[in-house]
Structure formats: C-alpha cells, structure tokens
Image (tube, helix red, strand yellow):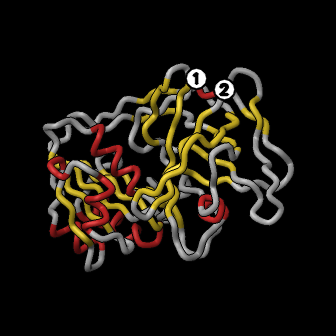
Amino acid sequence: MFERERIRHRFTARPATVAAVAEVGDYVRVTLTGDAFADFASSGPTDHMRVYFPNPVTGELVAPAADGEDGITRPAAQTFGRDFTPLNVRDAGATRTVDIDILRHADAGPAALWAARATVGDELVVVGPKGSVSAPQGAQRALLVVDGTALPAASRFVDLLPDSTEIDVLVCGGVTEDAARDYLGDSRRYTVTEAQLELTDEARDLAPDAGTFVFAAGEASALLPLRRYLRRELGLASAQAVTSGYWRTGVVAWDHHAPIDPFDPED
C-alpha cells in the first residue's frame, strides 16, 4: 500500500540561469534553466536539489562543478547552498526549465536575500536531485503536515497522489488556511486544517489509521513530538510515516538528512 518507486538520476552540478522571476503568495518563484538541464529529472514529491547562491557580502558565486558523467567536485572555499523542492519541470522547445519557490521571511538568509533582488539572467548552480521516490499509489488517505518551507513538497504530493487518495493538509508555522489553499490550487483535491494546538494534538484529531500515509516536514524540533506519536503510540512504520526536518531554529544550513530524533535508532 505504501510502496514507493525509487529512480536514480544522473548526479551532477548544473550551471543555471534565471529565466523568470514571479511572486507566488509568500514565495519568490524563480525559473531556472541552462545548457546542462536537458536531462534534469524530478518525479517524486520529496525530491530535493541543492541550489548554490552568491556570497551575500561579496557577490561571488562559489559552487561545486561537474566531474565527468556522474559526480561533482566540491570547492575548498565557503559555499552558500540551500535545499529546495524542484517544481514544474517542463520543456519549452529545446530548453528544460525548473522552478524553485523561495520563502520570504524576516530572518532572511543567503537564499531569501538573493531572491529579494533576483533578476532574469542571474546565475546560480544546481546540484541534484540524486534520485526520486514516487508518491505512494496505494494509500487510501494521505495526511500532509507542513510549514511554509515544506508547502512546495505538499503541492507535489497533491499533484502526484492518485485521485482515489483522500488528502488532508495540516499547515503549521504561521501558514494560514487561505494561504495554503491559494498556493496549492485546485481545492477539490484536499482539505486544509490550520494548526492551532500542538501538532500531535492536531494530528490525533485527524485520526491517521492503517490506511493513512503521513508526510510531515518543517522545523525539526516542532516535529519531534509528532514523530514520536506516529511511531511509538500509533506504531506506524517508517514507510507509512515519513518525517523530515527541513530546518532547525538557531542552526545555519541545517542538513535535512540529519535525524530529528537522535535517540531513536530508526531515525
């Protein structure tokens, strides 16, 4: 029921040029393209690619470079890379493009600072994704628990889950129900609940059961009690309940591969 197909992609560094910039709700949507994007692929809702931005002080872009057919060479100098969900991969004539949505927020880092003044023709470097993991095609229901950083991933689940899957979206971290609906689009595909209590209490009210696939992503510390509830109280296996810390308060360039629960051997 919760099986997800895994596909490996060519892993390389791709020089990228900004083809368009637009405002989408609380995000700056940046469209990227380049000569090396012809085989760029992303077919899973939890895919991520690392985007390298210029140094916010000097403006110098330091980033990995392609190393042969499959691989990268990392520079010795400091880089400013952040992970983003690839969106809207498409071909326009002979050119392949991909969008990233950069969340505007008060405590802006290198990505948000760059996005505030991004223009067509700006240059970045994109690494990945290494592969894709498909949305589960057999789940009766999906519960998506996301904040503003993970709402793009939720939008991909909404697009990629089958029509037969009932979708409930629980938004947190200050994301409003109206903002989520505006961002996600076709509201016939899902329901939205705006978190008012602790995430564990909200999830309990939404009653995930044996037929429910759960995806929870956002601030790592906020997800920890929810993860323990899903895994320990409900006994959901890792294939059924996926939790990912996209960022952690007070940590610069948090690695979302890091465990959000270091005391859980299955994390």
Task: Give the structural element (helix, strand or loop) at label 2.
Answer: helix
Q: Amino acid at mark 1?
A: Ala
Q: Which numbered dot is residue 38?
A: 1
Q: Is residue 171 left or right of residue 51?
A: left
Could you tell me which residue is drawn at 74 percent across and 31 percent down? 66
| Quadrant including the N terminus | top left
Task: Give the structural element (helix, strand or loop) at label 1.
Answer: loop
Provide residue 65's location: percent of width, then percent of height: 77, 36
Q: Are marks 2 and 1 in contact (CB under 8 Å)?
A: yes
Provide residue 188's location: percent of width, then percent of height: 14, 49
Q: Is residue 91 above or below residue 252?
A: above
How far separated are the C-alphas under marks 2 and 1?
7 Å
Q: How many other residues sit within 10 Å of disc 1, few (<14), some (14-19) or many (≥20)? A: few
Residue that label 2 marks? 35
Could you tell me which residue is drawn at 54 percent across and 56 percent down? 256
- Can I make out residue 207 in this image? yes
Q: Amino acid at mark 2?
A: Asp
Q: Report the front residue among 200 and 22.
A: 22
Q: Quadrant of residue 32?
A: top right
Could you tell me which residue is drawn at 40 percent across and 37 percent down? 44
Q: Which residue is situated farthest in the right direction here?
A: 76
- Can I make out residue 254 in this image? no
Q: Which numbered dot is residue 128?
A: none
Q: Is residue 208 above or below residue 52?
A: below
Q: Is residue 84 left or right of residue 141?
A: right
Provide residue 18's location: percent of width, then percent of height: 62, 43
Could you tell me which residue is drawn at 51 percent across and 37 percent down? 98
Q: Is residue 74 above or below residue 266?
A: above
Provide residue 198's location: percent of width, then percent of height: 29, 77
Q: Is residue 264 left or right of residue 39?
A: left
Q: Quadrant of residue 180?
A: bottom left
